[in-house]
Amino acid sequence: MADDTNVNLRKIQIYSVFVRNHTAEGTLKALEADLPRIKTLGTDFVWLLPINPVGKVARKGKLGSPYAIQDYRKIDPAQGTWTDFQHLADQIHQLGMKLMIDIVYNHTSRDSVLLKQHPEWFLHDEQGNLYNKNPEWSDVAELDYGNHDLWDYQIETLKQYAAVADGFRCDVAPQVPLPFWLAARKEVEKVHPNFVWLAESTGGDYIREIRGKGFWISSDGEIYRAFDLAYDYDIDQDWHDYLNGKTSLATYVNVLNHQDLMYPANYIKMRNLENHDHERAHKIIANENDLINWAAFSEFQKGATLVYAGQEFGLTHTPSLFDEDKLSWKRQIDLSPLIRRMHELSQDEIQVTGTYQVHDEGNDIVAVTYQQKEAQRLGIFSLQSKGGIVKTTLDDGEYHNLFDNKTITVRNGIIHVTGSPIIVEN
């Protein structure tokens, strides 16, 4: 992990916006009207999916993926101008939030400025044809960081954005060599001290596949040397296996606890139930009470939090990355108060630096403890809305549920669970 990463970044909540689909207009200017509402959720960073022009060659869908970028240094004219980008950043800052933008440095579109000007900066096979490590990404051309002139260009671009933004979410970060990221971080720090770096890290199967082809790809243990935060993809398959009944809660709990031992002490995971690449949480967790428990549990875990636009209202449709697909803001369930409350709790020191452990309590009930000297905070979440009991070391008596303000009784070292989240402390 970056040695100077501040563990207070565990307090942050990131709100992810796909500008093209977020409003009817699909522009940077139109997004500004929604910023006050976004702020009320407890948002610290507004993360914009790529806002650059999209390539036309080999485009997927009518509008193309925002991750097939034609020119890193320009703003998509359909979304606005560089002035609009700066104005949006100013509005975000005035509301006390920060701006994070998407950086896509593993590849460009197949008609990009860089490919036209510097074809030698791209991967080619033995016949001289463009080569992709991931053949599914047929709309992009992958860059070759063996050329250090490419490093200079990319870092200069980062410095231009760092003069406006406060953080980068780096797409497919592990496939870009770690030495590049270390050099980039050092240079960006000169423009914007305390800049925040989030890596879209990846899981073990994909790491094995890419390394098997003879290419660089970083594990989370490596990526933390240059980045402040990393995705939770290292255990994403374990989570889906539990949701789909392929494995037990005990197995899932074990991998969560293992995370806390295998990474540096100041590691920060970005916890999330959904993002632009995955199905909506309410789609895969249909029961609303289950969803409430999962949302509370996710945000109570050690690390930062991601909210994908529309998640707060339980939207079930995953917007297309390739075609116009405006968000429908019709509320299925309003999780806004939950998100706001869990963010408030995450600001407390015990959840930032306290000793953390996850426990399988049986009957699909999970407990999370934070311990700091004599202080203990206990969260209990019924992931399938079942009742049960949880044994605790808290003294017998009545406690205030920090989640919903109800009274929780501890008797004979036992808390009775009825299906709703419980958060208590001594």
Image (cartoon, rainbow, N blue to C red):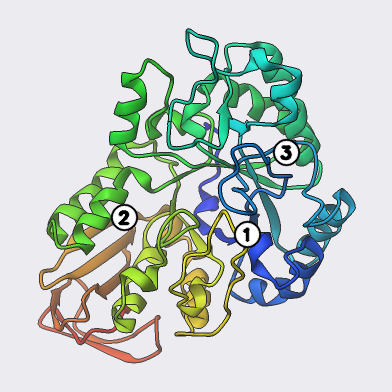
Between the C-alphas of marks 1 and 3, the distance is 27 Å
In the rendered image, residue 39, in percent from the top left (x then y), is placed at 66, 72
Mark 2 Cα within 10 Å, few/some/many (few <14, many 20+)? some
What residue is disc 1 on? 18
Element on which disc 1 rests: loop
Res. 267 visible in picture: yes
Residue 307 horizontal side relative to residue 36, left or right: left
User: Residue 136 appears at what percent x and percent y?
Assistant: 43, 37
User: Which residue is tagged 3?
Assistant: 193
Q: Say what secondary structure mark 3 lies in.
A: loop
Quick one: 43 or 23, which is closer to the camera?
A: 23
Q: Distance between the residues labelled 2 and 1?
A: 33 Å
Farthest residue, direction right? 83
Structural crowding at the residue carrying mark 1, measured as other residues with C-alpha within 10 Å and reported as few (<14), some (14–19) or many (≥20): many
- Work out whether residue 426 can be spotted: no
Nearer to us: label 2 or label 1: 1
Residues at marks 2 and 3, CA–CA distance in whole angstroms: 30 Å
- The amino acid marked with disc number 2 is Tyr
Q: In this view, does 192 lie above or below 64?
A: above
Which residue position is annotated with label 2? Answer: 356
Vertical order, 200 against 188 (above or below):
below
Name the amino acid, label 3. Answer: Pro
Taking the spot 19% from the left edge, 59% from the top edge, the residue there is 242
